[in-house]
Amino acid sequence: MDDYDSARVYLAKWAATVADHGDRERRETRELERLHLGSSLGAHKAHGHNGRRINDHEDEEGPLGAFNVLDLETECSLIHHTRTAPLSPMEWFAFFDEAGRLKVSEAQVRETVFRGGIDHDIRIEVWKFFLDIYPWNSTEAERIVIRATKAEEYYALKRQWFDDVAIQDSEAFQEQKLRIEKDVHRTDRTISFFASETLPNPSGDFTGVGSNENLELLKDILLTYNVWAATPSSASTGSGKPAVTKIMASVSSFAAEDLSESSPTAESNLLEGYVQGMSDLLAPVFAVMGDEVMGFWAFVGLMERTKKNFYRDQVGMQSQLETLSQLIQVLDPKLYKHLGIVPG
């Protein structure tokens, strides 16, 4: 199955999910109207306009056919923002005591960043807390040890595939590598971190497309993440052969099965190798961190929050659609009501 076939299967499943969600919303809306809005609907239908006024919109006839005219009036008050200045280096350093441990709560830091963002000069250090590289209650001395330990763990993971020619020559590994290379060379070249073409492309499949050290490290990080995802609870010590063997076998099985059938078990949710779009999450994180090791662990932290978006049963996408629906229902009830009525 090539990239386009995989994309078609994914989009078909996603479209079916959206359609099912919309149908359910429309059924719920109609039931609500039947139970509670019957008299109101009758009054709207008797409206003296040329069109039919139903549920706060009018159906009007025009040269191109029927269209909806929405009532833009709303009883909701305007929402006033509470945006503040970005978290500055002076404010950030003042959050810590003499031992380098935060004196303020995690919640306070998060709210400060939520309201104002982060000054560029301290973004790397702040992100290390937000992306779970550093524990929130750690001291400066503990963080020094963490950085050294994380470097050892990363290079041990990388060696599991980087130093093994047999694994690199395997069909499953080559398939993963090709998928990663295709995505990496689509990375936004307007970002200076990835813009230059100082290296010839090591893959003959991309003739005329140059590369650079940072793009090549993107590939290495994504290949290493494959190994980490197969053994998330291990400390990546020892030879690591079982981890690589597991992920390669998993990838081969995934490629061979019929993707139109989704298993109802938790096993169907396993991340089985690289999935298109992961490089788009890694690229900005790596560009900010500017370091292979910290870029990898920041990506691990980000993926722990977003990996459901890459599951085959699309549970992450469904959850986000549900959240979006709930937000629209609260923030713009009229739009929510209208979307529940119009045909999908």
Image (cartoon, grey):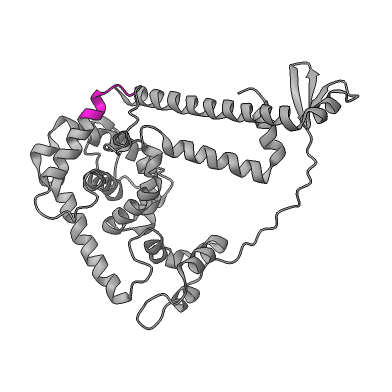
Q: Which residues are magenta?
A: 253-259
**Quarter assignment of residue 133:** bottom left
Q: Position of residue 197 (x, y in %)?
A: 31, 44
Please indicate, yes or no, whether residue 222 appears anywhere in the rendered image. yes
Name the foreground residue: 119 vs 247: 247
Residue depicted at x 49% and y 63%:
110
In the picture shown, does residue 254 fall above or below 128?
above
Q: Position of residue 90 (x, y in %)?
A: 48, 76
> Within the magenta stretch, is there residue 326?
no
In the picture shown, does residue 192 fall above or below 20?
below
**Quarter assignment of residue 293:** bottom left
In the picture shown, does residue 150 fall above or below 189?
below
Q: Position of residue 85 (x, y in %)?
A: 58, 67
Residue depicted at x 33% and y 26%:
3
Name the foreground residue: 32 vs 14: 32
Q: Position of residue 13 (x, y in %)?
A: 43, 26
Please indicate, yes or no, whether residue 195 appears anywhere in the rendered image. no
Quadrant (top left/top right/bottom left/bottom right) for the C terminus: top right
238 vs 94, left or right, is left
